[in-house]
Amino acid sequence: MKKDIHPKYYHRAKVHCACGASFEIGSTKESIETEICYKCHPFFTGKEKLVDTAGRVEKFKRRLAKKEELVKKKKK
């Protein structure tokens, strides 16, 4: 194998989540900041949680409401 082509590997890299959880993993980065981890992700917790980025949820709800309104008008 060629020498000095691989990045440094940290066996105890720190991961900090926005929910406040922190844990250690192996990584090529010494410290990792994340928004969602296994302690707060809806798939692992079983709780529905909306993660809104730049108003996407509200935008979707507005579009859905407009669509339902058009369907009601067509039925009349």
Image: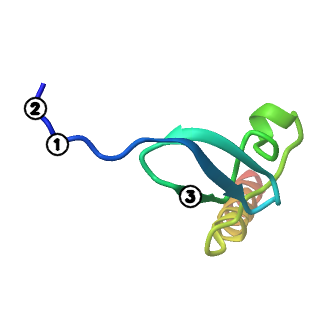
Q: Does 38 sit left or right of 4 as displayed?
A: right
Quarter of the image holding residue 34?
Answer: bottom right
**Residue at point 66% right, 62% down?**
60
The circle on residue 2 is: 2
Secondary structure beneath dot 2 equals: loop
Residue picked out by circle 1: 5
**Residue 74 % position (x, y):** 69, 56
Locate the C terminus and report the quarter of the image it occupies: bottom right
Task: Check disc 2: other Cα within 10 Å, few if <14, some if 14-19, many if 20+.
Answer: few
Locate the N terminus and report the quarter of the image it occupies: top left
**Residue at point 73% right, 63% down?**
61
- The kind of residue on which mark 1 rests is Ile
Secondary structure beneath dot 1 equals: loop
Q: Which dot, 3 or 2, sits closer to the camera?
A: 2
The CA distance from mark 3 to mark 2 is: 27 Å
The furthest residue to the bottom? 54
The furthest residue to the left? 2
Labels 3 and 2: the sequence-earlier one: 2
- Up-down relation of residue 73 to residue 8 (above or below): below
Secondary structure beneath dot 3 equals: strand
Front residue of 25/40: it is 25
**Residue at point 67% right, 43% down?**
24
Q: Does 28 sit left or right of 68 as displayed?
A: left
